[in-house]
Amino acid sequence: MSRPRSLRERLQTTTFLAVLAGYGVLLLLNNGLQVLQRRSAHAQLVAAVWQELDAGRLELPAAGVLPLPGGDELRRVGPSAVQPPRIERVAGERWLVSAGSGLEVRQNVSAVLEAERRGQWLLVAVAGFSSLITSALLRPVLRDGLSGPLEVLSQALASAEPDAAARQELIAVADQPTELRPIANAFNALQRRLAAGREEQRTFIDGVAHELRTPLTLISGNAQRLERLLAGTTPEANGAPLPPLLQAGRAIHAEADRITRLVRDLLDLARRDGDRLELRSLPFDAGDALLAAYERLETLAVGRLRLQAPDADADLRVRADPERLGQCLTNLVENALKYAPAPTPVELAVERRHDSVVLHVRDHGPGVAPGEREGIFELFRRGTAAPLASLSGSGIGLAMVRLLMERMGGTAQVADAPGGGADFQLLLPALCTV
């Protein structure tokens, strides 16, 4: 299948062919005019010969040829009807012959035809040269008037930010060629509509998040109070099941916390494009942050969470937002508990790797296929192992992890865990180099 030609190539080819076609038509018209002129001159010669014969100033030869001025000839032939002029080639010369009444008027047109032929070849050469010149001159015109402005417009479209309209960073219509101004105007109008839509979306999400925070805080607080009251009236018994009311209180507390985190993630995602996502930058030890996450999440893991002690000599200091790093670890641990079959453990570890500090959340679930390891960090994307999860997910947890890590100067990735499963890794630049 041939490569589709660009608009510039089509315009150059079309112009080249148009010039050739124009010269071709001109060549045909010129040839026709020359034929008419030649026949008109011959007709005048024949008329002059007959006039001279009628006036008696020319004597008909009994036989042979009567030379005429200019190298032409008058010949006596046998009786014949009047015939239209024709071209005859005799001894390398070409003659235009008219016959009638037993006479032939023969006009030598060799020089005329040779001149016409040279003129035609000259016209063909001029046509080819003009086509090449036109094509060459058209190239910079197309580059400066079409390709260049289109490339600038394409770069502006590609680099346009969602909130550009709000900051008046739109395409300058006055700087565009006349033909491209409608496109620039249409893009500016679309950008304004998108900016207005995004602003409405942010306002809506901010409002919803604000309205949800108060009832969620009340639900969580009352659930904690209920837990404390019930726990105070329930004697501790090893291995004994918790009373139903205490179980319900803890379940309400856990779900309220989960919904609170979900609302926070949604609000952070809504703030990511407008540089409204605020993060702190503090120096701290990543090992301490991992230990704090382990202590906070151990109750959710039902004894499945394992903490691997870091190397005592490793410098694990980083500069980031400790609260947001804890949020990333929470999302990864919840994701691992969901996909890894119980009672397989979920392991937490931290290490120094060259100039980076890497925090690991490893599970022994189905793992992540190599072709999906980037896609699962996109918003609302789940891997092929999603149907194996015990609960349906929102599709924003891993996207939130990647967003927060990038805003803290790091990244998030996934690899194969030793012994099978997934190894989710959070990488941050080390505060000091080794």
Image (spheres, rainbow, N blue to C red):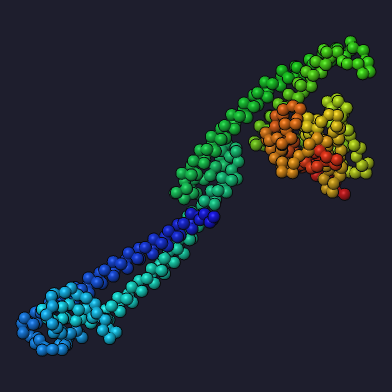
State the residue lying farthest toward the left. Answer: 55
Quarter of the image holding residue 124? bottom left
Quadrant location of residue 366?
top right
Residue located at (38% from left, 64% from top): 20
Residue 84 at x, y = what percent? 18, 73
Q: Residue at x 60, y 45 (%)?
A: 159
275 or 311: which is nearer to us? 311
Examine the rendered structure and indicate whether residue 136 appears above or below residue 219. below
Residue lying at 90% horizontally and 37% vertically, measured from the top left: 308
Of the pair 73 and 266, the residue shown nearer to us: 73
Residue 166's place in the image compared with 69, above or below, is above
> Does 207 sit left or right of 259 as displayed?
left
Front residue (pair 394, 357): 394
> In x, y percent, where is residue 345?
86, 32
Residue 416: where, in percent of width, then height?
80, 42
Query: Is residue 309 visible from the viewing direction of this image?
Result: yes
Q: Position of residue 101 (x, y in %)?
A: 10, 78
Viewer-nearest residue: 58 or 33: 58
**Which quarter of the figure is the N terminus placed in?**
bottom right
For this view, does 304 lie left or right of residue 211?
right
Depicted 418 relative to depicted 200: above or below: below
Residue 285 can be seen in this image = no
Horizontal placement of 381 versus 251: left or right? Answer: left
Residue at 71%, 19% (x, y): give it.
Answer: 214
Q: Is 302 located above or below residue 149 in the figure?
A: above
| Count of numbered labels shown in the rendering | 0
